Every structure is written in C-alpha cells, then in structure tokens.
Image: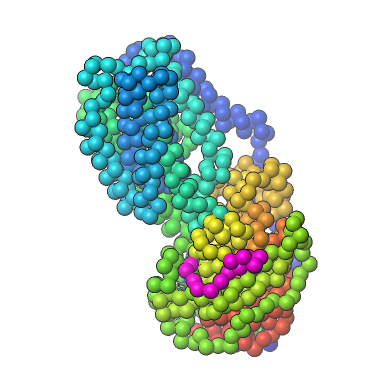
C-alpha cells in the first residue's frame, strides 16, 4: 500500500503571474520626485516673498516640526513601534544648539544643528534598549516615562543664554525670518533625501520587514536588535535636528514647547495623518503648529487640538488604518486569519484516493485535533523562546504514543542531479540527536539525519509530527538539545547568525511585507547585494512582477513565489522550506514545485521541503524523511519510503485516532 494523492491539474500549464500596468521609468520618476520638489519650491520661493511675517513664522514652525514627524515615520511608520518621547530628542537638539551658541562653538548654526542631532543619538539608543524586550503598551509606557523624565531634567536647566538675553545666532545669510524659512526648507529637504537613501538600503528594508515579522527578518539574516536600535538612533537624530531648527527660529525656548504632552499630541497627529510617506510627514509637520493657531483664531482653546487628535487617533487605530494600521497586533490578527484560510485550503487540496492516501488526508485534517493546531502549534508567531518550559495543552497525545519505530541516524541515500556551488562544494546539513521539549511534550525526539548535498529532500509526517519544530530548532528559533552542523561546522546562537552562516528558512505563514517593493524584498530576503540584472533574472525565473511593483498589489500565490525566490536568490548553503505551497491552487503548486526542483541546479543550495502534497513531493524530491511523534520513522527512496509499513501506519493510525 502506498500513499498517493490526486491533486487535479498537475500537468496543467504554468499560470500567468499577475503583473501591474507598467509606466515608463521617466513617468515613475516624475510622479515620485515631482510633487515634493514642487512643494519645496513653493515653500522656498513663494512663501517668503508673499506671506505676512505672521504666516512666515507659523509655516517655519511647521517646517521645523517636519523632522519630528519624519522621526515618527522611522520609528512608528516603518518599524511599527509606539514611541511617545520624540520631543525629548528635539529638546536635546535645541539645548545643544543653545549651549554651542553661548559657548561660541566654531562652525556656526548649521554645525551646531548637526552636533545637536548627533547628541540625541545616545539618548535614542538608551530608550531603544528596553524596546528590544518590551512591546505594545509596555513600550509606550516606557517611552512616555522617558519623556516625562526628560521634562523634569530639562525643566531644571534653563535654555542656555536666557540669563544674558542671548538669542541663538542664525547664519549670516539667513538672519531674516523669510530667509530662515528657506534655510529650514533646505535642511528638511536634505533630511528627506537622507531618509529616501536609507529606505533603499538593506537597513531601511529591514525596518519594514521587522514591522511585519521580526522572525521573518531574523530568518533573512537581519540582526533584529541592531536594526531596531539603529531605528531609534536615527529617529532621535531627526527629531533633534527639528529641535535645533526650532531653537534657530525662536532664539530662546522653554521646556513647555517640548514637553511629554507635546510628544503625545504629535504622536496622535502622526497616527491620524501618517508620516512614512513624504507627503504625510509634510502635512503632519505643518499641522502640528498650524492647527492650534487656526483653532485659536476661532476662539477655541488650543488644548482641544490634543483632544481632537487623541480621539481621531483612537478611531484610526481601532479601524486598523493610518500609521498603526499594521501594528503588531493588527498584523498578528491578519496573519492568524491568513494561516487559518491557508490551512483550510491545504486540507481541501490534500484530497487522496487510495485507502492509505485517504488516511493521509484524514490524518492531515485530524492533526488539528490531535496536535491542537491545524497549522502547527509550533507556528511561527508562537513564542518558542524558552520552549522547554512551555507545556502544550495537547501534551498527552504526543508523549503517550511516542514509542513507535524509530530510525535515528538515518542517512538519505538518493541523489538528484545538482550543480556544485561556485566554490565546488555541495553544502549539507547534519542533524544529530536533536530534541525539543515543550514541558511534558517531546515534540522532536532524538532526531538525526544528514541531508543529501545538492538535492531536494522532503520532510513528511502527519500534522503534529514535529516537522516545523525541527526546523525551528535547527534555525535557532526554538531551544533544543543536540547538534546542527552545516558543512561540518556546528551552528549555534541566534537565528540571524545561522541565516548568515548559510542556513535559511521559510515559515508556514507567509512573511512577505506588503509595504516593500518586489525588488527590495528580494534583496532583503537574499541577504546579499544583488545587481539589477540578478534581481530581474531571479524574478523572471519565478515569474514574479518587476522589481518596482509594491508587494501589496500582488495576490497571495504570487507572494508565496516571491518568498521562495528571495530565499533562493541568497544562494544559501541549505534552504528549509516549511510548506511553501500551503493554501495555493494546483497550478500555483505545480509552478512552485518546478522552481523548487531547479534550485539546487541553479544556486547549488541543498533543499529540505516540508510538504503534504504527494504529487508535489514526487515531482520535486529525490528522497524523503518521514517523521511521526517527533521521531524519524523512515528515510530514503520515495517509493520505498511511501510503501514502508511504519509510514502507512503513521497515517492510518492518525485516522484511527480521529475515529
Ligand atoms: N509552542 C509550543 N508549545 C507546546 N507544544 C507545542 C508548541 N509547538 C509545537 N508543539 C507541539 O509539538 C508537536 C509538533 O508540532 P509541529 O508544529 O512541529 O508539527 P508539524 O509536524 O510541523 O505539524 P504541521 O504539519 O501541522 O505543521 C505537536 O504536538 C504540537 O502540539
């Protein structure tokens, strides 16, 4: 008896990938650079020439606030972290400029502004440290506590020069209010360019990935701690530049302009208007000082602005829109929903015909009941840190029957034709005596195997067999005992280190941030510099849309392809793919299977594929490893393994357990 599946349309032609209408490059450039340049020109030439001194003063205040909004655009808009202390950094910048002014530090106002920005970076890193451990409301409280602490500290330090009635000296060419507005516009324009350049780097892309999935980013080799700290440092720099400009505008300041309540109001404005896009940062910046003045003109108390934006921010967050629309909680909810839909669809796809095959299908369905979760409780967002201390609700089912036949130390023999890597080596992964425990549950029980170098091997097993947990443990996402060796060298430490060493993985749940473009995701996931030609080549190979297309416009099936394309583009030594075709239709599965089969030959990577679809497995994999109840029960040639009584029993047993 062997396990067979009847996925319809296996021989159907590959589907056409959806592509968005393409504009010529010059049109795209004009559309993205034209409007900000036009606004900058209006602010630079028109306003100083035609506006009254009152309006020039108000608009300059708005322009000086833009860097604070850009700072929120970095920390909240990009990384997705709530930060309620951005005006404290602005205060550091303003006070530094005041101090430099009083002490006659050489270089003048612009040099002092840069010094102010740099001085705020350590403060940003300081508040960033707790952010590595805290999330959501706790982090918000920590940042607000920092802001109120800074209120107290700076409340006791008068603005430098106040005693001597010494105002901050503006540069000679920009002494008048109109000219200072022009200087502020220039500085802010430079900051916009700087931010656009950062956005194009791996760091910028990693921020968007962090916001969507920290685990996904780590699996691509991003050092989550460094990336987050960099965001806090750079955000503090931007805010402080804003504060420095405010010092130049007013000449002398008080702490009330930078208090924690102002931080709170600006955060609310940022949530409502947004700050990640240049236009939103501009509008939010101008709204900060302009709205209170306009409301004042209507003889309404200015404090109502805070109340108004506070209410709007709450509604915006509740509606899942605006700056926090993709906050951690929202994303977690969306991911859970996608996972549910995908696992339901996967079960529908895994229809089987033969008695044993039917058992396999039933087992796949039953896994949810037996294992407690259809898509695996060791799922990607489950907190697997300190995994050994966690007790699964379903522990009894896993441990009670874990005495099945065990094939430890199995070495998969079958080879598929594959290309050697450029250096002539064929990378391999050795797992030795690996165990993972969740309290009383032994999810992975002394598993040992060696992957066939330069080939695609399937990792099979009913739901709850321990496949995802094994991958989590090997890639550093779950605590384990035993050894994992890549090319003979033991891998230890955090996920990003293992990823950089050449062990890459995908997750059952899709981890492709919709806010990135196709090209920036490919580069981020690859974890190495790719030339434009390489990017195009990889995208064409997987039938993905062109590099400039935003991922948010693509369907889920295309995103799945892109995810694997990105990992393959990294040419890792070993690639672990955890159900990459989950939730896809037959034609998409066939296309993905064909591409996965080509990976070893094109990139020299060794691939381990977790998959329930037997047609896909047969088409793609030269050898199999089958797990059940945390143990390897069979491995080797597909035909022999699928006919193995232990394998058949594993699936039939699962069916019996359901009945
Ligand atoms: N964080 C956790 N806490 C407690 N038990 C867990 C945890 N993660 C996984 N388990 C348990 O470990 C066992 C193995 O789960 P795992 O998700 O690795 O199986 P799987 O073979 O990947 O299943 P699927 O095919 O559904 O993805 C199951 O019994 C599961 O309930």
Residue 481 falls within the magenta-colored stretch = yes
Q: Give coordinates of residue 653: x percent, y percent.
A: 55, 87
Q: Which residues are magenta?
A: 478-490
In the displayed structure image, the side of residue 374 where residue 153 appears, left or right:
left
Q: Give coordinates of residue 652: x percent, y percent.
A: 58, 86
Question: Please, is residue 600 above or below residue 144 in the view?
Answer: below
Residue 344 falls within the magenta-colored stretch = no
Image quadrant holding the N terminus, namely bottom right
User: Front-most of 509 and 630?
Assistant: 630
In the displayed structure image, the side of residue 323 where residue 577 appears, left or right:
right
Q: Is residue 310 visible?
A: no
Q: Give coordinates of residue 365: x percent, y percent.
A: 53, 76
Question: Please, is residue 88 above or below residue 612 in the view?
Answer: above
Q: Give coordinates of residue 552: x percent, y percent.
A: 55, 48
Q: Is residue 425 visible?
A: yes
At 53% from the left edge and 64% from the top edge, which residue is drawn? Answer: 492
Residue 252 image-quadrant placement: top left
In the displayed structure image, the side of residue 161 where residue 106 appears, left or right:
right
At 48% from the left edge and 67% from the top edge, which residue is drawn? Answer: 478
User: Front-most of 629 and 241?
Assistant: 241
Question: Magenta residues: mostly which secondary structure?
Answer: strand
User: Front-most of 291 and 86?
Assistant: 86
At 50% from the left edge and 19% from the top edge, which residue is drawn? Answer: 41
Question: Please, is residue 603 above or below residue 1 in the view?
Answer: above
């Amino acid at each position: 008896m062997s396990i067979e599946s009847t996925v319809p349309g296996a021989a159907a032609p590959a589907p056409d990938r959806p592509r968005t209408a393409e504009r010529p490059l010059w049109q795209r450039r004009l559309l993205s650079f034209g409007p900000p340049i036009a606004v900058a020109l209006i602010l630079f030439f028109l306003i100083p020439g035609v506006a009254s001194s009152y309006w020039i003063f108000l608009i300059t205040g708005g322009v000086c606030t833009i860097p604070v909004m850009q700072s929120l655009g970095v920390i909240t808009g990009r990384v997705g972290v709530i930060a309620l202390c951005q005006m404290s950094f602005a205060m550091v910048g303003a006070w530094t400029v005041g101090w430099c002014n009083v002490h006659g530090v050489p270089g003048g106002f612009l040099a002092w502004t840069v010094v102010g920005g740099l001085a705020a970076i350590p403060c940003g890193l300081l508040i960033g440290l707790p952010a590595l451990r805290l999330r959501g409301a706790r982090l918000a409280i920590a940042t607000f506590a920092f802001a109120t602490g800074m209120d107290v500290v700076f409340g006791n330090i008068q603005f430098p020069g106040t005693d001597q009635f010494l105002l901050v000296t503006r540069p000679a060419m920009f002494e008048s209010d109109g000219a200072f507005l022009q200087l502020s516009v220039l500085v802010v324009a430079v900051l916009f360019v700087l931010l656009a350049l950062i956005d194009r780097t791996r760091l910028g892309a990693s921020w968007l990935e962090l916001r969507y999935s920290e685990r996904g980013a780590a699996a691509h080799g991003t050092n989550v701690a460094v990336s987050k700290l960099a965001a806090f440092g750079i955000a503090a720099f931007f805010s402080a530049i804003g504060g420095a400009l405010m010092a130049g505008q007013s000449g002398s300041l008080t702490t009330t302009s930078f208090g924690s309540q102002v931080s709170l109001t600006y955060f609310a404005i940022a949530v409502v208007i947004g700050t990640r896009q240049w236009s939103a940062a501009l509008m939010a910046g101008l709204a900060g000082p302009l709205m209170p003045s306009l409301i004042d003109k209507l003889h309404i108390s200015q404090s109502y602005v805070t109340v108004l934006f506070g209410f709007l921010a709450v509604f915006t967050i509740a509606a899942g829109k605006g700056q926090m629309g993709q906050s951690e909680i929202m994303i977690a909810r969306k991911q859970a929903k996608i996972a549910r839909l995908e696992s339901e669809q996967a079960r529908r796809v895994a229809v089987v015909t033969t008695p044993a095959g039917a058992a396999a299908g039933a087992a796949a369905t039953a896994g949810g009941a037996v294992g407690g979760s259809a898509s695996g409780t060791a799922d990607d967002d489950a907190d697997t840190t300190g995994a050994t201390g966690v007790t699964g609700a379903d522990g009894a089912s896993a441990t009670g029957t874990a005495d099945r036949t065990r094939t430890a130390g199995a070495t998969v023999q079958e080879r598929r034709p594959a290309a050697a890597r450029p250096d002539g080596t064929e990378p391999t992964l050795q797992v030795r005596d690996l165990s993972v425990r969740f309290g009383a549950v032994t999810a992975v029980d002394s598993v040992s195997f060696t992957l066939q170098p330069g080939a695609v091997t399937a990792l099979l097993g009913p739901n709850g067999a321990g496949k995802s947990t094994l991958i989590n443990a090997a890639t550093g996402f779950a605590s384990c005992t035993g050894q994992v060796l890549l090319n003979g060298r033991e891998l230890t430490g955090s996920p990003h280190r293992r990823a950089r060493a050449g062990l890459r993985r995908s997750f059952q749940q899709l981890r492709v941030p919709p806010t990135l473009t196709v090209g920036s995701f490919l580069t981020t996931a690859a974890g190495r510099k790719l030339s434009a030609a390489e990017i195009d080549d990889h995208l064409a190979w997987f039938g993905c849309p062109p590099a400039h297309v935003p991922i948010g416009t693509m369907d889920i099936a295309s995103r799945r392809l892109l995810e694997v394309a990105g990992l393959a583009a990294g040419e890792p030594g070993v690639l672990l793919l955890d159900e990459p075709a989950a939730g896809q239709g037959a034609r998409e599965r066939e296309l993905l299977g064909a591409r996965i089969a080509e990976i070893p030959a094109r990139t020299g990577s060794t691939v381990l594929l977790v998959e329930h679809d037997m047609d896909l497995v047969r088409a793609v994999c030269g050898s199999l490893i089958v797990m059940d109840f945390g143990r390897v029960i069979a491995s080797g040639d597909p035909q022999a393994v699928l006919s193995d009584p232990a394998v058949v029993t594993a699936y039939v047993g699962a069916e019996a357990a359901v009945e």
